[in-house]
């Protein structure tokens, strides 16, 4: 984070110019995005056993399944048809146009490839309670906050292409049971995330003009980073250290 950024945050009297606001948003990702989490570092480095990788994929499914719900909530708040047309593509990307298409179907191919029972994954019965709380908090956030804050919260996509590249390389290099076909979900995500984050960033920079609006969008992105981080905290606590798996959650010996 640059000294200029830390010395001159938006105040009630002095808003940031668009370039400085973008810098402030990107700085949040540099320090808070979940690619920095110890669980992800271990995942990429091949330091997890198969059961731990399964737990990650199973819990991440819940997040993936709720992304279209989140985007539908945002879409329902948009009064401008052009804006709705742009945003609804996100739902198509994840839900697809049939059951065998879209990001959610490709994520289920990942959990299939890791040896998890599909009906069990889709039921979400084994998902950690903290994962559900974090994901549902995100859905509530986009419903309850302003449209500007809801759109700003999606800007974690600014950082995902870099993280996806490292994850795919690490998993293919370090886990002999992981193949490119299993990781097909990630094939389209960098391009989609770049398209979506470019649009959302332009919207935020155009509409967050007042200092209070700029503070709101910075807090919204921080909140979203916290949502992603909290999910990995839950995985680390349950499946690494200290290994306290909550009642009802996925247990590797029962997989």
Image: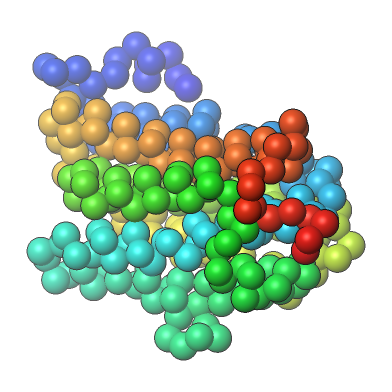
Expressed as whole percent of the image width and height from the top left, the position of residue 253 reads 82, 57
Residue at x 54% of width, y 38% of height? 229
The quadrant of the picture occupied by the C terminus is bottom right
Residue at x 84% of width, y 50% of height? 49
Q: Is residue 110 above or below residue 170?
A: below
Q: Locate residue 57: give its quadrant.
A: bottom right
Question: Left of 126 or right of it: where is 239?
Answer: right
Is residue 187 visible from the viewing direction of this image?
A: no
Is residue 8 visible from the viewing direction of this image?
A: yes
Most distant residue in the top direction: 7
Expressed as whole percent of the image width and height from the top left, the position of residue 244 reads 70, 37
Q: Locate residue 17: give its quadrant.
A: top left
Nearer-the-camera pick, 64 or 164: 64
Expressed as whole percent of the image width and height from the top left, the position of residue 136 reads 39, 51
Q: Is residue 210 above or below residue 86?
A: above
Question: Left of 168 or right of it: where is 47?
Answer: right
Expressed as whole percent of the image width and height from the top left, the position of residue 160 reads 53, 50
Residue at x 19% of width, y 65% of height? 76
The total of numbered circles placed on residues is: 0
Residue at x 50% of width, y 86% of height? 99
Q: Is residue 52 above or below residue 61?
A: above
């Amino acid at each position: 984070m640059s000294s200029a950024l830390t010395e001159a945050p938006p105040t009630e009297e002095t808003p940031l110019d668009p370039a400085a606001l973008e810098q402030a948003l990107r700085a949040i990702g540099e320090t808070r995005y979940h690619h920095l989490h110890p669980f992800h570092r271990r995942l990429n480095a091949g330091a997890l056993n198969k059961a731990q990788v399964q737990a990650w994929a199973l819990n991440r499914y819940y997040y993936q399944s709720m992304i279209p719900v989140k985007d539908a909530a945002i879409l329902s708040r948009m009064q401008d048809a052009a804006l709705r047309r742009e945003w609804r593509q996100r739902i198509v990307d994840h839900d697809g146009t049939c059951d065998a298409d879209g990001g959610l179907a490709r994520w289920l191919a990942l959990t299939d490839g890791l040896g998890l029972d599909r009906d069990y994954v889709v039921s979400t019965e084994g998902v950690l309670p903290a994962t559900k709380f974090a994901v549902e908090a995100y859905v509530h956030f986009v419903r309850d906050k302003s449209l500007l804050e809801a759109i700003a919260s999606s800007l974690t996509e600014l950082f995902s292409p870099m993280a996806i590249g490292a994850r795919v390389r690490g998993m293919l290099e370090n886990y002999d049971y992981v193949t490119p076909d299993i990781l097909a979900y990630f094939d389209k995500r960098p391009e989609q995330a770049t398209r979506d984050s470019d649009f959302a960033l332009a919207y935020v920079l155009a509409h967050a003009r007042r200092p209070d609006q700029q503070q709101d969008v910075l807090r919204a992105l921080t909140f979203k980073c916290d949502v992603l981080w909290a999910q990995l905290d839950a995985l680390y606590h349950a499946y690494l250290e200290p290994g306290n798996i909550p009642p009802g959650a996925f247990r590797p010996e029962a997989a």
